[in-house]
Amino acid sequence: MNDLYILLGGNLGNRKENLEKAIKLINERVGGIEKCSSLFQTAAWGKTDQPDFLNQAIKVNPKKSDVSVILSDLLLIEQELGRKRIEHWGARVIDIDILLFGNEIVNTQRLTIPHPQLPNRRFALIPLNEIASDVIHPVFHKTIANLLLECKDGLEVIQIK
């Protein structure tokens, strides 16, 4: 089964508790949690007039092999935790993004894997690097560690745990 790497984030409510609830639900419904990165705080990316985000990367051993089913499960978890999709890059209680799914490359209207912005976002690369530095990005054929070294994003990412 493919390793599933997910980035969790949020900037509303009790951010740490929201991430913990998401991890619990992912563990129950999507697959066993194998690794969790530290927690990292960053300013909002894209739309900057909002509270700071708390982010964490996790490695999941998925119960299912169909990534579209996994996506549906993750979107339902977001909804159950109070996610409302009001504006692109807006403030949110929880955000669950699939970063990588083994070596799979998916490009549909609903989903793109690997996450298309992963190489450009330090707030995703830093926590992912902590748990998967040697994993090879299936499009760029570089390790996560190398992608982080090459990333031009200047956003400060602060480890808090």
Image (cartoon, rainbow, N blue to C red):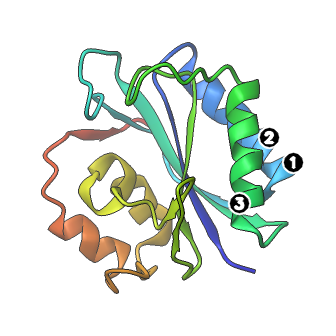
Q: Residue at x 27, y 28 (%)?
A: 43
119 up-or-down from 23: above or below? below
78 up-or-down from 121: above or below? above
Q: Dot 2 corresponds to which residue?
A: 25
- Of the numbered discs 3 and 2, the one sitting upstream in the chain is 2
Q: Do the residues labelled 3 and 2 touch (CB within 8 Å)?
A: no
Is residue 161 something one can see in this rendering?
A: no
Q: Distance between the residues labelled 3 and 1?
A: 18 Å
Q: Which residue is drawn at 78% across and 73% down?
A: 65
Mark 2 residue element: helix
- Of the numbered discs 3 and 1, the one sitting upstream in the chain is 1
Tag shown at residue 28: 1
Q: How far apart are marks 3 and 2 (CA)?
A: 17 Å
Estimate how packed mark 1 is, as few (under 14), some (14 to 19) or many (20 or more) residues with alpha carbons within 10 Å.
few
Query: What's the amino acid at mark 2?
Result: Leu
Q: Dividing the picture into quarters, in which one does residue 96 lie?
A: top right
Q: Dot 3 corresponds to which residue?
A: 68
- Residue at the extreme front of the image, as rendered: 109
Along the line of sight, the residue nearer the viewer: 27 or 75:
75
